[in-house]
Amino acid sequence: MTAGIGVLAVPGWINAAQEANALNDLSMVADAQSARLTVDGFYAQTLPALSAAQDVRIQPSEGAKLAVSANADRSAWLGVSRAKTGIYLARLSGGTTVGKGLTLEEAVTAAGTTISGPATSRITAEGVPLPQPWDLALVAYENLHPNPGATSFTGYYMWQGTTGQNTAVGSIAGVDWSLSKKAYRITFTTVRANNGDFSVRVGDYVPPGATFTVRYRLKVSEDLSLSAMRFWNEDAGTAILASSHPASSVIKAGEVVEAWATVRVPTGVQPGTNLRLGFDIRGHSAGTVIEFGDADLYLGPQDAARPWFYPGVPADDGFRAAWTTSRPGTVLYK
């Protein structure tokens, strides 16, 4: 017989050895949870807790992913494995049926329960939370910035220029060029001093001493000269390792420009909200509008092949973007 998407009763129905390995992972979880119930009177709520209780490291087979959860009073559990083939397998407490599916939800439903709740906090009929899809998936990229869509002022900054000389208004505006269709918009109403700046905050979102890259996109209403990208509160000459903009870059009106820099936080510098990457503004006038957003922050050097991604925006090759819930950030996974 050939295994299809649905219910599996015995391991012999699985043709692929990789899926058989994933099924064996779930059998180990079931045995360990049964022992936990016998000894402690309740089930473990996470895989690390289950391993600790059994004093045996329970880990997924090569190429597979494994997750365990339990309801609030730990009277019911759910185990989910994602085989190297990409197929999901699920098993519930109180039964031996293994559900199989192309998605996490399909597998859990096929195991013999129903699912409810919003996408980021789904639970079974027994009250057991489902693992987040990216916890079991192949995560290709992660964006550490908490507000890449510029849906609020969080993570962004602007300085209007010399007090009493320049005035500007900052707002979150609807635009047609960003992934989220939102951007931080700066509108200058008075310009008597040839200065001002704008930037993306990074200090709170990277660890001390890290090398990281930040990139974002911007658009201006008239030709402007932007200095080389700066790293405020530190010497840009030693902190910035590489940048996309040489000094005095002219940004053409109406163009969507990508700016990036790879930065090493100097030793001993503690991250904070004043660590930010951006540009000094020159050549602007009353009525000048600058929009910027699509902030992307990641550890390591600049990756020229890295795609832009945002939740709800279609991605290539079956990948999906989603907000993570354990920390601010976004992942691209499948």
Image (tube, rainbow, N blue to C red):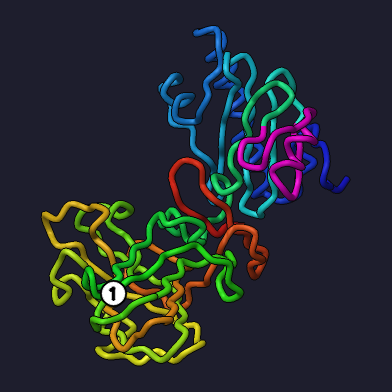
Q: What element carries label 1?
A: strand
> Residue at horizontal 58%, vertical 71%?
175
* Vertical relation: 276 (above or below) 6: below
Q: Which quarter of the image is occupied by the C terminus?
A: bottom right
* Vertical relation: 104 (above or below) 163: above
Q: In x, y percent, where is residue 114? A: 78, 30
Tell whether 276 sits left or right of 138: left
**Depth check, front residue: 221 or 113:** 221
> Residue at horizontal 64%, vertical 28%?
78
Q: In x, y percent, where is residue 329? A: 46, 52
Q: Does the magenta stretch include residue 104?
A: yes
Q: In x, y percent, where is residue 179? A: 57, 68
Res 57 seen here: yes
| Crowd class of label 1 (few under 14; some 14 to 19; many from 20; radius 10 Å) | many
> Residue at horizontal 58%, vertical 13%?
73
- Residue under label 1, please give it: 166
**Depth check, front residue: 278 or 23:** 278
Q: Which quarter of the image is occupied by the N terminus?
A: top right
**Depth check, front residue: 153 or 48:** 153
Magenta-drawn segment = 98-122
Q: In x, y percent, where is residue 41? A: 55, 7
The kind of residue tagged 1 is Asn
Residue at the far right: name it.
Answer: 1
The quarter of the displayed image where residue 296 is located: bottom left
The quarter of the displayed image where residue 266 is located: bottom left
Res 231 seen here: no
